[in-house]
Amino acid sequence: MPDGYIISIMEPRPILITGAAGFIGSHLTDRLLADGQFVVGLDNFCDFYDPAHKRANIQDALNNARFTLAEIDLRDRPAVAELVTSHQPKAVIHLAAMAGVRPSIERPDLYAEVNLNGTVNLLDAVVREKVMPKFLFASSSSVYGNNSKTPFAEADRVDHPISPYAATKKSGELICHSYSHLYQLPITCLRFFTVFGPRQRPDLAIHKFLKLVSQGTPIPMFGDGSTSRDYTFVHDIVGGILKALAHCDGYHIYNLGGDHPVTLKKMIQTIEQVVGKQAKIDAQPMQPGDVDCTWADLTRSKEDLGYAPTTSLEQGITRQWEWIQTTL
Ligand SMILES: NC(=O)c1ccc[n+]([C@@H]2O[C@H](COP(=O)([O-])OP(=O)(O)OC[C@H]3O[C@@H](n4cnc5c(N)ncnc54)[C@H](O)[C@@H]3O)[C@@H](O)[C@H]2O)c1
């Protein structure tokens, strides 16, 4: 072959995952790479929690030739547009966000900029560049606010968010609807219910409690322990995302929950069993922005997507505890 002869090999169109270095994004990245997909991961490694954790999350992916990392901030419109144009993703799974309810009360401006304007930048890029991928948006159970009816169904009214974070997620669903309507972009919004498992964000209760109980340090318990959450293991969420991707067509909203709401007291007892130590409780009042209960009605996601979570709280906490011990 003569010198300088270039063979052009067309790579298959990749899947763009925003927030790829985060908790859920890194599990999804690993799964898609294991399935043989090409993945472009967008992340700005913001310091909401230690970026070193995020680097560790995607260490394996970085060693895979089918993975490309783009260190880009979603708020950088030209950079987002350039990334979309150059990679022509066949699907976009938009997970990047400022997550967390309580910090959104301190910085509503930042949450609006990233979660809402950042989402607009991404949607704009895919329609202006005429890439027209399947588009999944990570929404949240928090959009239900303090819904008095349980379990929470997608057809319930969600116009009473009780934190800026929840309001940005509901706004994200609305802006997605308008892009789907205007440009016939296939979009599915997925309402995740309290996700846990290995690599869980350090600000979330199960991660914090596993560490504190093992160290014998008191854990802050907000309220009387009767609040409940529909905890969902991260591999079940990833399975639901893949099913939603396969069915992405038109505009839809689905709950992805764990199918078993558990009280805070019961969650702490499970942690005690798994760690083998009794928790010391530091009782605190309920926090503003926190809802009393979450519980996903999975009728629609089971019927339309075939979504079926399989991991119990105890199994999932055991897996998360095994992972935490490797990081201590
Ligand atoms: N973890 C849960 O229980 C849960 C529940 C409901 C919804 N969600 C949603 O799922 C998604 C993923 O959550 P997670 O728990 O994996 O959070 P995470 O913080 O671990 O991941 C989010 C990632 O987005 C990146 N990011 C933040 N701002 C960015 C910006 N301006 N530009 C580019 N990247 C940016 C972060 O660096 C991070 O790696 C979020 O949209 C979150 O709101 C999570």
Image (cartoon, grey):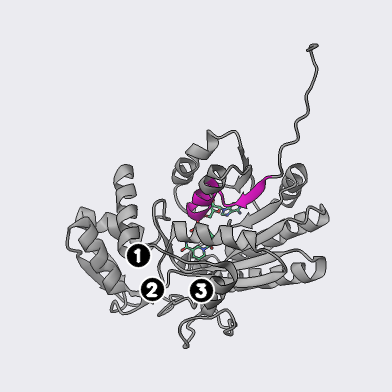
Q: Position of residue 197 (x, y in %)?
A: 39, 56
Of tags 2 and 3, the one toward the viewer is 2
Q: Position of residue 316 (x, y in %)?
A: 35, 59
Give the alpha-carbon distance from disc 3 to disc 1, as whole Å.
22 Å
First in sequence: mark 2 vs mark 3:
3
Q: Is residue 57 magenta?
A: no
Q: Which residues are magenta?
A: 14-29
| Nearer to me, 145 or 283 | 145
Kind of residue at badge 3:
Ser
- The question of residue 26 being in magenta is answered with yes
Q: What amino acid is at disc 1? A: Ser
What is the C-alpha distance between the residues marked 2 and 3? 17 Å
Q: Where is mark 1, residue-wise?
A: 312
Q: Is residue 62 above or below residue 215?
A: above
**Left or right: 181 as drawn, with respect to 113:** right
Residue 260 is marked as 2
Q: Which of the image's four quarters has the N terminus? A: top right
Query: Which image quadrant: the C terminus?
Result: top left
Total labels drawn: 3
Assess whether mark 2 and mark 1 are in contact (beta carbons under 8 angstroms): yes
Q: Secondary structure at mark 2?
A: loop
Q: Are marks 3 and 1 in contact (CB under 8 Å)?
A: no
**Which residue shows up at 34% across the image and 65% down it?**
313
Secondary structure beneath dot 1 equals: loop
State the residue at coordinates (57%, 52%): 19
Q: Which residue occupies 75% across, 71% down?
A: 178
> Which one is earlier in the sequence, the residue at label 1 or at label 2?
2
| Residue type indicated by callout 2 | His
Using residue 327 as the reference point, say whether residue 16 is left or right of it.
Answer: right
**What residue did someone put label 3 on?**
142
